[in-house]
Amino acid sequence: MKKIKIHIRNNHWKEGFLPCDPEGEKHSTITSEEFEKGLSKYPEIKDKIEYLVDWDEDHYLSSMKEADVLLGWQFPTKNISEIAPNLKWIHVISAGVNHLSPFDWMKNNLILTNSSGVHSKKAGEFGLMSILMLQNQMTKIVTNQKNKEFVTLLSKPIDGFKVVVVGTGSLGGSMIKHVSKLGAEVIGVNRKGNDVEGCSKVITFDKLDEVLPSADFLYLAVPETEETKGLINKTRLDSLKSTCGIVNIGRHSVLDYKTLRIKLEKNEIAGAILDVFSHEPIPKDSYLWDTPNLIITPHISSDSQGNYIEMVLKIFFKNLKLFLEKKELINQIDRKLGY
């Protein structure tokens, strides 16, 4: 029986890309040891595969000539059907795949899967922390600290406050479970208006303008798609209360950061916590660094320290077993939707 050939592509860190620093590189690297550890739980498939752990372009072209499966994050998509004529399945180690769009490079029978689900526990805790930080005016307190101002800022418990969550998948959904248990009223926003545990109400994107004016918090956890790009624009930011706080752990393109900065400076938005940016690391001359009532986190809202790749490989090997059995894979990306 012909063995399935797997090319594992790691990426060295590079400014402006992910991973964007040495710590990020360490966090996202698949080593032979990690791969073998995951494979040991599936002894029935060990003799059916062979793999190469590679870096960037080192052996990419020669290995991909015969590869059936590609496991990695960042890779060139141009002419991939010619470079890898046998390629049948690509698994991405992240949940987001917008860096690979548009998906016109994919031949019709090529399967693309992601690692959705590995981020949910950490994202839920980070999300709850962010909402509570905004509720307790921590963005203003941090700004006051920078300005050496000791000002008493009081707050109420979050019970009864309205949280509008745009994107109720594994990231947003995990946060919703936490914050709803504290008594917050949660309005979910997703593409189909499907019910979500912890939400008192769920609406579709086209009804978003009906709930924004009453939101105490706006939580963004959507991927970048044609539908979500520019979703929270100036008009929608203008519709928010001046006491509203904003969190973005989805993608930067969803929210108008320049307008947000102006509104934070004018106290027309109470505070914001941003975890995703167009360029990472953020340039030292970025206007964001000096924006008041803003807390910047370096794209760490949903990544777990130490065991991220272990969790990714759990999904990959589950799918690899299905792939060998010629069954439908989980976490498949709909190229039309972009997630």
Image: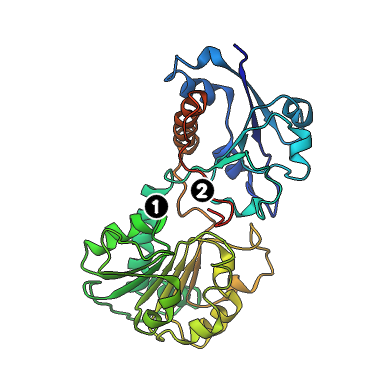
From the viewer's perspective, tell me whether residue 323 is left or right of residue 120: right
Q: Determine whether 19 is above or below 84 in the image.
A: below
Kind of residue at badge 1: Ser
> Which of the labelled discs sits on residue 95, or is there none?
2
Q: Position of residue 244 (x, y in %)?
A: 39, 80
Mark 2 Cα-neighbour bin, 10 Å: few <14, some 14–19, many ≥20: many
From the viewer's perspective, tell me whether residue 118 is left or right of residue 230: left
From the viewer's perspective, tell me whether residue 11 is left or right of residue 211: right
Q: Which residue is mark 1?
A: 170
Q: Quadrant of the N terminus?
A: top right
Kind of residue at badge 2: Ala
Residue farthest to the front?
A: 108
Disc 1 is placed on an element classified as helix
Disc 2 is placed on an element classified as loop
Q: Position of residue 234 (x, y in %)?
A: 55, 83
> Which of the labelled discs sits on residue 328, or is there none?
none
Q: Are marks 2 and 1 in contact (CB under 8 Å)?
A: yes
Going 41% across and 75% down the picture, which residue do you hit?
A: 245
Closest to the observer, 287 or 9:
9
Cα distance in 3D space between marks 2 and 1: 10 Å
